[in-house]
């Protein structure tokens, strides 16, 4: 196993169906063939608070936006303390399949949340380590939704989702952080992966002991 000078935190972000989970798996596989210690972590988690989030979504029960945000933040605090930080400490490459930029974009565009995208980022950065690279997979919501549902969707819901996801997409694209890179997620899985690997390999090579 190769050893790194310090851990690497990577985040894959973007709207539903953008290709985050697909690209995370490819990245893990390639880095493993190069003998790096790699872990994928997904948010919301399968831990205490993450399960509560998924249960609410599954049952279509809407929490108030501020309560929903609080639950995401609780889930992340637990994840940072018990998984993310320990893995970085043992110098692993940690790939986040969604992280705090998703919370900022999805919750920050909701009316009635009482917090802007920037305020949510600020709140998260108090406890959550900043990724070395954050990749936003960008694409029109219609394509992301189509990929997920493959054209079998009820149109009204689709329309509502699309409008919301269009705001989320704009929030992702509006992020002004040097370590955040948006890439065109409409292209083939292989082309998108080539761009991601290129960015990641440069960083990984610079961190090898
Ligand atoms: N570049 C691509 N071109 C075409 N189809 C793709 C591409 N990337 C992923 N897909 C397909 O689209 C679907 C959604 O991909 P994936 O699950 O990776 O998205 P995601 O961003 O993780 O979505 P979610 O936000 O719902 O978790 C999958 O069926 C996947 O195989
Ligand atoms: Mg996914």
Image (cartoon, rainbow, N blue to C red):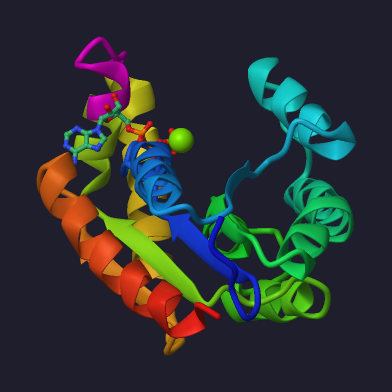
Q: Main secondary structure of the magenta part?
A: loop
Residue 80 horizontal side relative to residue 195, left or right: right
Q: Range of the magenta residues?
A: 147-154
User: Which percent across, then down, holds residue 117?
Assistant: 58, 73
Front-lying residue, 117 or 44: 44
Front-lying residue, 120 or 37: 37
Residue drawn at (51%, 81%) of the image: 207
| Placement of the N terminus among the 4 image quadrants | bottom right
- In this view, which residue lies farthest toward the front? 1
Front-lying residue, 160 or 187: 187
Check the image and report above or below for 6 versus 66.
Answer: below
User: Which percent across, then down, holds residue 173?
Assistant: 34, 71
Instruction: Tell which quarter ligand 1 is in.
Output: top left
Q: Is residue 207 magenta?
A: no
Check the image and report above or below for 199 versus 77.
Answer: below
Front-lying residue, 44 or 167: 44
């Amino acid at each position: 196993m190769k050893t790194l000078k310090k851990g690497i935190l990577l985040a894959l972000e973007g709207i539903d169906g953008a290709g985050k989970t697909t690209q995370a798996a490819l990245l893990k596989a390639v880095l493993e063939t190069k003998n790096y210690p790699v872990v994928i972590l997904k948010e919301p988690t399968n831990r205490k608070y993450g399960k509560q989030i998924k249960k609410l979504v599954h049952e279509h029960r809407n929490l108030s936006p501020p309560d929903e945000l609080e639950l995401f933040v609780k889930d992340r605090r637990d994840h940072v303390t018990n998984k993310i930080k320990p893995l970085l400490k043992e110098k692993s490459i940690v790939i986040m399949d969604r992280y705090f930029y998703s919370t900022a974009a999805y919750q920050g565009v909701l009316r009635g949340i009482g917090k802007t995208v920037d305020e949510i980022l600020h709140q998260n950065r108090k406890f959550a380590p900043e990724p070395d690279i954050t990749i936003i997979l960008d694409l029109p919501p219609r394509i992301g939704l189509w990929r997920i549902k493959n054209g079998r969707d009820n149109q009204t819901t689709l329309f509502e989702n699309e409008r919301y996801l269009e705001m989320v997409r704009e929030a992702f694209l509006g992020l002004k952080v040097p370590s955040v890179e948006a890439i065109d997620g409409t292209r083939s899985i292989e082309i998108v992966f080539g761009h991601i690997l290129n960015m990641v390999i440069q960083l990984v090579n610079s961190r090898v002991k």
